[in-house]
Image (cartoon, rainbow, N blue to C red):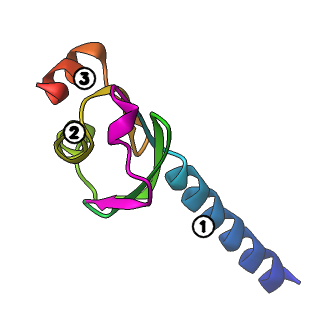
C-alpha cells in the first residue's frame, strides 16, 4: 500500500510539472497573416496559431527575451509574449520587435 501511494504521488508531481510547462508559452502576433498554418518548431518549441493567438509546448531552456527574438525572426512582430511562464514587459517587447 505504501509503495502504491509513493508511486501515485510521483506520477501526479510529474504530470503537474508537464501540464504547467505545456501551457506556459503564448504570444499574440501583430499581423495574423504571418501565422503559420501548421505547427512550427522554433528552438524546440512547437508553436501552433489560431489567427493571431499562438501557443507552444516544449522549448529550450533560454531567456524569454531570446526566445521572443527568435520567434519574431520567423513569425513577425508580437504584441504579447510569454515563454515558459515568463511574460515580457512593454519595454522588453519593444526591444524584441526591434
Disc nearest the viewer among 1 and 2: 2
Disc nearest the viewer among 1 and 3: 3
How far is mark 2 from mark 3, CA to CA? 10 Å
Q: Quadrant of the C terminus?
A: top left
Contact flag, marks 1 and 3 (Cβ < 8 Å): no
Q: Sequence order check: which comes first, mark 1 or mark 3?
A: 1
Indicate the quadrant where residue 11 lies: bottom right
Marking on residue 93: 3
Q: Name the residue under label 1.
A: 14
Q: Is mark 1 on a helix, strand or loop?
A: helix
How far is mark 1 from mark 2, CA to CA? 32 Å
- The answer to whether 13 appears left or right of 64 in the picture is right
What is the magenta range? 29-42
What is the crowding at mark 1: few (fewer than 14 residues within 10 Å), some, or many (at least 20)? Answer: few
Q: Where is residue 95 in the image (x, y as percent from the top left)?
A: 14, 23
Q: 10 or 27, which lies in front?
A: 27
Q: Is mark 2 on a helix, strand or loop?
A: helix
Residue shown at 71% from the left, 65% from the top: 12
Amino acid at each position: 500500500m505504501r509503495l502504491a501511494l509513493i508511486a501515485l504521488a510521483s506520477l501526479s508531481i510529474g504530470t503537474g510539472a508537464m501540464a504547467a510547462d505545456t501551457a506556459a508559452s503564448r504570444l499574440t502576433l501583430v499581423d495574423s497573416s504571418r501565422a503559420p498554418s501548421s505547427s512550427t518548431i522554433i528552438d524546440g518549441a512547437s508553436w501552433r496559431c489560431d489567427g493571431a493567438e499562438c501557443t507552444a509546448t516544449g522549448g529550450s531552456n533560454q531567456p524569454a527575451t531570446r526566445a521572443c527574438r527568435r520567434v519574431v525572426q520567423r513569425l513577425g512582430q508580437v504584441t504579447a509574449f510569454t515563454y515558459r511562464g515568463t511574460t515580457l514587459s512593454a519595454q522588453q517587447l519593444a526591444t524584441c520587435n526591434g
